[in-house]
Image (cartoon, rainbow, N blue to C red):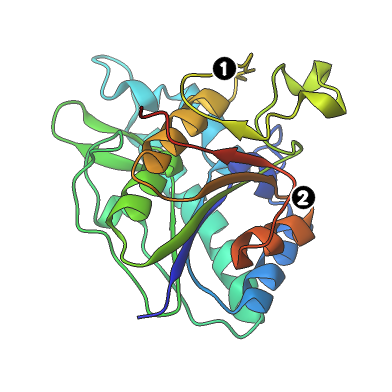
């Protein structure tokens, strides 16, 4: 079986995060073109951005069922919005002649965090999954983050060549928040033992921001996989990362001694 690359398209990369349900078609098409040119078998995990986070925040979906607080409509709306974003992603990939199949997590996954349950679905071509509202035995429902999907796909897939987080607007993990960062603030090699000053948009993001991504990436790196953070707005870097060329970004290394 050919090698496989696990690739995250961040929600803040493929949507205009401050506007409800507005996709960044230019970025999505550029990423789809890169996937086509790479010729690789891929698992693509895409984030929610403005199609999920804003309404999830409004309906407090990450907290599970709250007595006396009407959330059923919120669960339905977010799932429908995510299906719409997913259809945009899949259509862009198919436009380049790629064989693509999407597997909405609310149809096969249960629970939240990296130990969620459900057999991972695969397609022989391009497999697409995404962060979603899923059922949960303890709290009825919850937010299954794309970063947690990344962990299980990276750890449980056979023949993983590398794992890539394509981010919006930053070259990788920075020592300070992007608003204060200079070119020399990029951390080229990071492990879980190293500190950095993250910035979490808690008014928008319901899954943990860069801190969660770094934590989950570290979990993957600790299993011996190659893990990279790159700027998804620069398509040449995503392409280089997919095919294994040296690229500007952050390499996540094992924190195990």
Whether residue 143 sits left or right of residue 38 in the image: it is: left
CA distance separating discs 1 and 2:
23 Å
Whether residue 120 sits left or right of residue 197 in the image: it is: left
Occupied quadrant, residue 240: bottom right
Q: Which residue is mark 1?
A: 202
Residue 250 can be seen, yes or no:
yes
Occupied quadrant, residue 209: top right
Neighbour class for label 1 at 10 Å: few (<14), some, many (≥20)?
A: few
Tell me which numbered mark, 1 or 2, is placed earlier along the sequence. Answer: 1
Whether residue 79 sits left or right of residue 68 in the image: it is: right
- The residue located at (65%, 80%) in the rendering is 95
Q: Residue furthest right?
A: 182
The local secondary structure at tag 2 comes to loop
Q: Position of residue 164 (x, y in %)?
A: 55, 51
Q: Give the numbered dot on residue 46.
A: none
Decide which of 21, 144 is in the foreground and name it: 144
Q: Is residue 197 above or below residue 94?
A: above
Q: Position of residue 243 (x, y in %)?
A: 62, 67
Decide which of 137, 163 is in the foreground and name it: 163
Q: Nearer the viewer, mark 1 or mark 2?
A: 2
Q: Residue furthest front?
A: 257
Q: Is residue 128 above or below residue 2?
A: above
Whether residue 241 sits left or right of residue 224 in the image: it is: right
Neighbour class for label 2 at 10 Å: few (<14), some, many (≥20)?
A: many
Tally of numbered discs = 2
Q: Give the numbered dot on residue 233.
A: 2
Q: Residue furthest left?
A: 137
- The residue located at (61%, 34%) in the rendering is 189
The reply to whether the C-beta atoms of the residues labelled 1 and 2 are less than 8 Å apart is no
- The residue located at (77%, 50%) in the rendering is 233
């Amino acid at each position: 079986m050919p090698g496989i690359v696990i690739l995250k398209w961040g929600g803040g990369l493929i949507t205009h995060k401050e506007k409800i349900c507005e996709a960044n078609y230019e970025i999505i098409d550029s990423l789809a073109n890169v996937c086509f040119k790479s010729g690789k078998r891929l698992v693509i995990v895409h984030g929610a951005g403005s199609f999920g986070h804003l309404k999830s925040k409004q309906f407090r979906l990450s907290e599970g069922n709250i007595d006396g607080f009407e959330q059923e409509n919120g669960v339905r709306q977010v799932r429908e919005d995510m299906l719409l974003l997913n259809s945009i992603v899949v259509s862009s990939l198919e436009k380049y002649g790629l064989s693509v199949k999407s597997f909405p997590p609310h149809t096969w996954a249960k629970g939240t965090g990296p130990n969620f349950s459900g057999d991972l679905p695969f397609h022989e071509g391009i497999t697409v999954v995404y962060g979603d509202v899923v059922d949960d035995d303890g709290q009825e429902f919850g937010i299954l983050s794309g970063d947690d999907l990344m962990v299980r796909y990276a750890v449980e897939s056979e023949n993983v060549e590398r794992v890539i987080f394509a981010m919006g607007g930053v070259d990788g993990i920075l020592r300070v928040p992007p608003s204060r960062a200079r070119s020399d603030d990029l951390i080229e090699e990071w492990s879980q033992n190293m500190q950095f000053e993250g910035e979490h948009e808690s008014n928008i993001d319901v899954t943990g921001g860069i801190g969660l991504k770094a934590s989950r990436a570290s979990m993957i790196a600790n299993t011996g996989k190659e893990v990279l953070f790159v700027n998804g707005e620069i398509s040449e870097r995503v392409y280089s990362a997919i095919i294994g060329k040296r690229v500007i970004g952050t390499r996540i290394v094992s924190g195990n001694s």
